[in-house]
Every structure is written in structure tokens, then in C-alpha cells.
């Protein structure tokens, strides 16, 4: 779903990316800013339990991830080093985003499982693509959807822990289904 929206979002992202290029902001700098924002989000969530500031930091960090690739492409500096850096730091950000739930009363075992499943979803895509199998758009809940689920989860938490807990369980189940979908897609594509 997000993959389809991403194509439409380029109309919004391109002017911003061009403005950043004009002031010599590199894609790698943006990637690192996103990482720093994810650590700030984690600190705010863990120590202050301030969901509103946490949501703002999460959104800004996710936006950095959306814009860094556009800056790289438009400045003709997209390459394997930047791609590797971006993909690697995205995994750390994903761990930070989900770890922010620890201080809100969610079961540590389930949070750990969600972190593991989330990283596995990304690993399956990376492994598949290293084998020449396209994985973008495969599975119910890709990274963009996982970030949206976290935002909705935090908003629901403001209303009711119980509702947010059930939503967390749905998030976890859909993530597990995505692992299964990707595993089957990759395995069945291999000779």
C-alpha cells in the first residue's frame, strides 16, 4: 500500500529535496539526522513517557527516511554506500521506534517478538534482493505500514491502553503473516 503512495508522494518530496540540495545537505546527513531523531524519540518515550513529543519525533525521523533517498537521486549521488548506510540505519530506527513501547506497559516478550519479526521482514527483503528476487510491495505490512501502525498505536494509547494493546496484537499478527508471506515468496522463487 505505502509503495503505491510513495510514487505519489514524490510530488511533495521533490521540491523539499531540491531545496536541501541547494543548501548542500547530503542524503547521508539526512539519514544520520533521522537516526538521531529516532534515539531522541526513544529517550523521550522511555524517560518522559511524553507520547505527543514522541509522535512528533517519530514522524520527523520517518520523514528523514522518506527524503534522504530523494535527495540522493536528485543530486545524482545515489549509490551502494548510501543505500547500505540507509538500510542499515533504518533497522536501528525500527528497533528504537518499537522499543519506545517498553515504558508504556506493553508486554516485554511481545515487544521483543515484534522487534524480531520487524527485523526479519526487512532481512527477508534484503536476502531476496541479493538473490535477484524483487520483494518491494510483497507482504501485508512493509516498513511504511509498520511506522503508520506505531503512530496509530500511540494515538490509541492516548485514548485507552486496552484498545492500544489489542491494536498492538493485530500489528504483531500482521507482521508475522508478512514474514510468512515473504518467506514463501522467496522460497518458491528459488530453483
Image (spheres, rainbow, N blue to C red):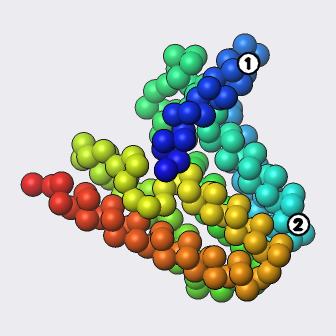
Q: Which residue is mark 2?
A: 50
Q: Residue at x 49, y 50 (%)?
A: 1
Q: Position of residue 190 (x, y in %)?
A: 15, 55
Q: Residue at x 56, y 18 (%)?
A: 74
N-terminal of the two: label 2 or label 1? 1
Q: Position of residue 32 (x, y in %)?
A: 68, 40
Q: Where is the C terminus found, in terms of image quarters?
A: bottom left
Q: Is residue 116 above or below residue 81?
A: below
Residue 19 is labelled as: 1
Q: How far, Cα to Cα, is label 2 from label 1?
A: 32 Å
**Camera-side residue: 185 or 114?**
185
- Helix, strand or loop at disc 1? helix
Q: Residue at x 21, y 61 (%)?
A: 187
Position of 158 with respect to 7 (left or right) is: right
**Camera-side residue: 182 or 163?**
163
Position of 183 with respect to 104 (left or right) is: left
Q: Is residue 191 above or below residue 63?
A: below
Amino acid at each position: 500500500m505505502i509503495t503505491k503512495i510513495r510514487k505519489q508522494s514524490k510530488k511533495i518530496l521533490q521540491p523539499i529535496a531540491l531545496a536541501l540540495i541547494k543548501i548542500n545537505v547530503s542524503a547521508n546527513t539526512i539519514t544520520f539526522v533521522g537516526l538521531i531523531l529516532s534515539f531522541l524519540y526513544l529517550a523521550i518515550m522511555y524517560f518522559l513517557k511524553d507520547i505527543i513529543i514522541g509522535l512528533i519525533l517519530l514522524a520527523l525521523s520517518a520523514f528523514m527516511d522518506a527524503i534522504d533517498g530523494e535527495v540522493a537521486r536528485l543530486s545524482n549521488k545515489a549509490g551502494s554506500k548510501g543505500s547500505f548506510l540507509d538500510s542499515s540505519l533504518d533497522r536501528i530506527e525500527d528497533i528504537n521506534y518499537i522499543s519506545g513501547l517498553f515504558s508504556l506497559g506493553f508486554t516485554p516478550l511481545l515487544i521483543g517478538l515484534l522487534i524480531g519479526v520487524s527485523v526479519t521482514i526487512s532481512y527477508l527483503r534484503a536476502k531476496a534482493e541479493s538473490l535477484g528476487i524483487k520483494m518491494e510491495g510483497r507482504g501485508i505490512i512493509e516498513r511504511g505500514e509498520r511506522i503508520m501502525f506505531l503512530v496509530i498505536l500511540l494515538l490509541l494509547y492516548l485514548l485507552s491502553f486496552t484498545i492500544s494493546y489489542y491494536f498492538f496484537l493485530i500489528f504483531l499478527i500482521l507482521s508475522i503473516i508478512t514474514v510468512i508471506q515473504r518467506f514463501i515468496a522467496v522460497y518458491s522463487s528459488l530453483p
